[in-house]
Amino acid sequence: MKFDLISLELSAECALRCSMCSLNRYYSDKGYMSAGVIDRVLPALGRFERLDFGTTGETFQHPEFLKILATIRAEYPELLTHAVTNAMHFDERTCERIVELGLHTISVSLDAASAKTYHKIRIGGDYSKVLAGISRLGRVKARRGSGFPYLNSTFTASGRNYRELPAFIDLASSLEIREVHVNNIEVYHEADLKQSLYFYPPDDLADVIALTKELARTYEIDLRLPAFEVGELPPCRYIVVGVTKDGDVVPCAALMYNREYFDLSQQKRMYQKRIFGNLHYRTLDEICASPDFTEWFEPFDKGEYHNDCKDCVRRFGVICG
């Protein structure tokens, strides 16, 4: 089976304590991907078209991220590279370096159009610092005449912040962000059930979304919206070769570590970590070619799902836009 995407968990650390995040509640094994694991990943990267940095923690917090990126870009210049970030680490040196190295895309998680809402959701973050960092990156790109990294932004919508969506489109335009992905929260805590827009859609949600769409058209921003109610089951978009910081190879970011969540019937379920091998004992090529790994993906080609996946809310389109 051909896999286009590999996701590397360079970091299982994050200085933020976001209200909707499962990392600090369920992920106790913190730390960074070691040089040994990275050395074992590198020889196999040529089989992939895309590389995502970031599945659990903050990629730019890894002390050697820029060095790792430089090595990968030098050895695999055709490999498309993507990073997810809270944008708390966009100092001058980092901005200069990622533009110089040609990191292709960055998704900035913001979740608010005001400092007050931002600090309620992204606890430990600094709204002014984030906006200044994004602006700094834009200036470096302009000075160097580069279109990379291409920026998009994510907005995880809930009852706490959905009314700021129109203002968020204004903000994205001012920061020269041309693509906005709106996500629903995946509910990990019972207290968040009432905050879920697909469990409890507020009366004015349709009006807010309509205005958001209108502004996105005006600014020519590519707006990606999730479903706000469960409809026809779409194909799973989460087929990926994932490598944890410790070298475990997993088939999906949702199955990277054990954590509870609430399914679409608001019943508590458990994502169980599913490991197909470890890079300390087998190469990535050997694991990807193994019968147990390739057979695990076969049902997806038929629109079928494993027991691991049958209650996963991500596959119903209500999480990611």
Image: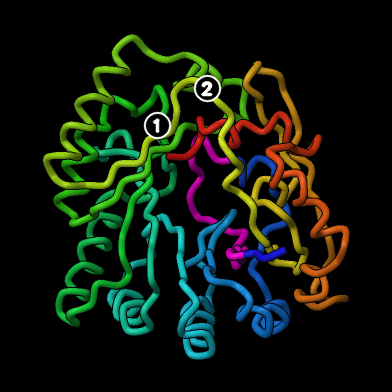
* In this rendering, position of residue 21 left or right of residue 178: right
Q: Nearer the viewer, residue 40 or 218?
A: 218
Image: 319 above or below 247: above
Label 1: which secondary element: strand
The boundaries of the magenta stretch are: 4-21
Quadrant in which the N terminus is drawn: bottom right
Give x and y (percent) for residue 267.
Answer: 70, 19
Numbered disc total: 2
Q: Is residue 316 magenta?
A: no
Query: At x 82% / y 75%, what residue is drawn?
Result: 286
Residue located farthest toward the top when viewing the structure as drawn: 203
Query: At x 24% / y 54%, what residue is drawn?
Result: 177
Give the residue number, with chain letter if any, for mark 2.
231
Structural crowding at the residue carrying mark 2, measured as other residues with C-alpha within 10 Å and reported as few (<14), some (14–19) or many (≥20): few
Give x and y (percent) for residue 201.
Answer: 42, 15
Q: What residue type is labelled 1?
A: Ala
* In this rendering, position of residue 152 left or right of residue 304: left
Q: Nearer the viewer, residue 24 or 178?
A: 178
Image: 266 above or below 2: above
Give the residue number, with chain letter if any, for mark 1.
157
Give x and y (percent) for residue 175.
Answer: 19, 55
In the picture, residue 143 is in which quadrant? Answer: bottom left
